[in-house]
Image (cartoon, helix red, strand yellow):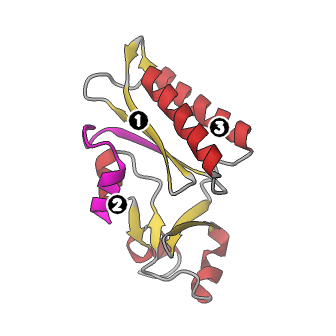
């Protein structure tokens, strides 16, 4: 899985590049995906920190996860440049009537497709076999490209959720 994630992310970004992950409460249509990827491209190509260009990358993955990456090798991302990235995400949220900031909506890969699941429904999903300890969980708390490559997609039993739901 690590190699598959590496293929999704830009190869020319340093492993310490900062990452922001926004998971939608629903998948986007083909038309929406094209529009969103274009908006992300436009934003990252003009992204700046105190007037200096930020080496940025943005892409919609799994039809409903927006990933933004800033390579800070040459230019550090400032509070203002972070705010500008949040503005584009909030704009996408309004434009497509989605929720991109619900951190209690967890993502699991089930049969190769992203399945969002409210945290309070995880015990039920485990009990009914919808997910199990080996189901891949999207660890959207990763902070760098290196962390994303190593531990973005984790078996549930290896995630912080394992202790919470007595899987460890």
Is residue 47 something one can see in this rendering?
no
Residue drawn at point x = 57 percent, y = 63 percent: 106
Residue drawn at point x = 54 percent, y = 80 percent: 131
Say left or right for 91 vs 165.
right
- Can you say whether 157 is above or below 127 in the image? above
Say left or right for 160 vs 73.
right
Tell me how far mark 1 sits from mark 3, CA to CA.
16 Å
- Can you say whether 89 is above or below 8 in the image? above
Badge 3, how many Cα within 10 Å: few under 14, some, many 20+?
some
Q: Which residue is mark 2?
A: 151
1 or 3: tag closer to the N-terminus: 1
2 or 3: tag closer to the N-terminus: 3
Residue drawn at point x = 64 percent, y = 44 percent: 32
1 or 2: tag closer to the N-terminus: 1
Tell me whether the residue at label 1 lies in contact with that at label 2, contact meaning CB atoms closer than 8 angstroms. no
Query: Residue 139, position in %: x, y?
Result: 45, 60
Is residue 39 something one can see in this rendering?
yes
Tell me how far mark 1 sits from mark 2, CA to CA.
19 Å
Query: Residue 6, position in %: x, y?
Result: 30, 53
Most foreground residue, 113 or 88: 113
Q: Give the structural element (helix, strand or loop) at label 2.
A: helix
**Residue occupying the far front of the picture:** 31
Residue 99 covered by magenta stretch = no
Q: Which residue is mark 3?
A: 92
Most foreground residue, 122 or 160: 122
Task: Specify start and end residues of the magenta stretch as a single range.
Answer: 1-20
Residue 57: mark in rendering: 1
Query: Residue 63, position in %: x, y?
Result: 56, 55
Query: In which quadrant will I find the C terminus?
Result: bottom left
């Amino acid at each position: 899985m690590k190699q598959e994630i590496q293929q999704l992310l830009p190869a020319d970004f340093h492993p310490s590049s900062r990452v922001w992950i926004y998971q939608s409460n629903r998948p986007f249509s083909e038309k929406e995906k094209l529009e969103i990827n274009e908006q992300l491209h436009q934003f990252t190509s003009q992204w700046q920190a105190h007037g200096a260009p930020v080496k940025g990358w943005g892409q919609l993955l799994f039809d409903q996860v927006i990933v933004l990456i800033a390579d800070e090798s040459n230019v550090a991302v400032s509070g203002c440049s972070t705010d500008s990235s949040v503005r584009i995400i909030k704009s996408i949220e309004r434009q497509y009537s989605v929720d991109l900031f619900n951190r209690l909506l967890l993502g699991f890969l089930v049969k190769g497709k992203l399945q969002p699941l409210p945290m309070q429904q995880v015990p039920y999903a485990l009990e009914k076999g919808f997910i199990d300890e080996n189901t891949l969980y999207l660890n959207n708390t990763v902070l760098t490209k290196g962390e994303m490559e190593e531990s973005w997609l984790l078996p549930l039993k290896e995630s912080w959720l394992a202790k919470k739901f007595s899987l460890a």
